[in-house]
Image (cartoon, grey):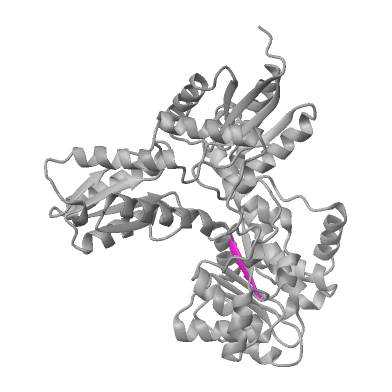
Amino acid sequence: MSRQGQSAVVIAGHGSRDPDSLREFEALVDLVRERAAGRIVRHGYLEFAAPTISEAAAACVADGATEVAVVPGVLLGARHAKNDMPAELLALARDYPQVDFHFGAPMDLHPLLLQLVQQRIVEAEAQSQDLIARRDSCLVLVGRGTTDPDANGEIAKLARMVQEGMGFGGIKVCFSGTATPLVRDGLAQAAAEGWQRLVVLPFFLFDGVLVKRIYAAADELAQREPGVEVLKAAYLGVHAHVADVMLERAREAAEGRAAMNCTLCKYRVQIVGFEQQVGEPQRAHHLQVRDLAAREQSAPAILGTAPYVPHPIEAESMEIIQAGRDWSGFPPEHLTVLQRLVHTSGDFAVADEIFFSAGAAQAGMKALLRCKRVVTDVTMVQTGLKRAVLEQLGVETWCGVHDPESHLMAQNLGMTRSAAGIRRAWQKFGNDIVLAIGDAPTAITEAVRLIREHGWRPQLVIGLPVGFVGTRESKDELRRCLQVPRITNSGTRGGSPWAASVVNALMIDAIAWLVAQEAQTEGAQ
């Protein structure tokens, strides 16, 4: 039978390394297909598993579909639904101009899902031999946890709706990762409040690594706190309500009615603490793990770290710099930083004025790989960082100098905005950062004060501001700050390009280190 002109639905799943999660997702797709009234229904994965979303869409086109609704198989709208999946859709629209592609909204807090949450709670309570009033119970609702406050806020909203709708005496919201409190902390807090019963509900679609960890944490708490009954409610799972919500989202997409909550979307409006992400391009962040399982089986070698390949002019410049003076007196781990500073400044003498505390270069390189965050005092440093290298290593950057909160802090505390941005970084990120200062001596002064008086311990402080007012003094103060690894210089020279060059050099060294480690591992096998 010809399917020419038919509409199709692609359920876009996240993907998982856990086979239980994949089996359940595909069982749900089968259920959607049964209820789809003859439409073509296929599935694809964003990460880890196959088929990919693009492969699923291609199969729909091959089946004769001229209209395809791509529905996110995720509960809430965060990075995957707002960036990664739309990026896939844009690529599909380019590759198949003859096909109308529509993007559906995430499932969100649909009334059918609320009913299913209610059902899972009642099922969990029925497992107990004890009759305990809901007013003496606390619901511990566990969300996935994201970097998007809107999505995390939806978990809190769901918790309040369930608490008021079902009469729980208490509610505790926690997350499996990224956001806080984490599961074990949330469970401990709830147990400490003296409830007779805790009902632990993972607001997840399917089983998987994270759900198993949530249940393990609940089991640990039950053993540690025998006086508290701990019930484990099921996740949403394969259910007609879930399938019907997905089909409703597909219909809305095809009819042009798909709507996300843009009122508090950090990519569209300024949300407190996330102001810099307004208008951020829709870039895919999942390409390294797309169809990962299949690639691991078929061609493990392609998963290795790609070496850093400089532009030909850059490479020629570095060859000239390496041959331009005697470098034998410098430690090998300092050479990339020093030579790139020479490249930036056009002055071989720069190498003689740079100060490294013991182990600073190695500490900074490892911190970039582990913490994956660079904080800068001004946007000029941020702009000077090599975008391709940042993306390869997955390193994020942050600069608070132009944020409204930094402006308010500067006004109310009588400090510069650069210094306020440094204080905000201390409050926002704690110790797991590399701090690169290339413009403001006041930023160094504030950083040193926080390090000495408040125990801040950035993994590396790069202090290379330029100028005549306070510049020498701030650098000298940083050099004497023994509590943290640091890279700085003496005198008035420096600037944002210098600070960016140091970070770029450390990232290039980090890539080389990864390549060497992988080669060593491969040679040992």
As drawn, 132 above or below 468: above
At 55% from the left and 63% from the top, the residue drawn is: 367
Q: Is residue 352 left or right of residue 191?
A: right
Q: Main secondary structure of the magenta part?
A: strand
Q: Can you give x and y, in whole percent of width and height, for residue 462 in the image?
A: 64, 75
Look at the image and tell me whether residue 64 can be seen.
Answer: yes
Q: Can you give x and y, in whole percent of width and height, for residue 460 in the image?
A: 57, 71
Q: Can you give x and y, in whole percent of width and height, for residue 257 in the image?
A: 63, 40
At 70% from the left and 47% from the top, the residue drawn is: 307
At 74% from the left and 79% from the top, the residue drawn is: 352
As drawn, 401 above or below 180: below
Residue lying farthest to the top in this orientation = 1
In the picture, residue 37 is in which quadrant? top right
Look at the image and tell me whether residue 512 can be seen.
Answer: no
Q: Is residue 263 left or right of residue 232?
A: right
Is 18 in the magenta?
no
Q: Can you give x and y, in whole percent of width and height, for residue 263 in the image?
A: 60, 58
Quadrant showing the N terminus? top right
Q: Which residues are magenta?
A: 373-377
At 58% from the left and 42% from the top, the residue drawn is: 105
Number of marks drawn: 0
Q: Is residue 5 left or right of residue 39?
A: right
In this view of the protein, which residue sits in the foreground, 108 or 314? 108
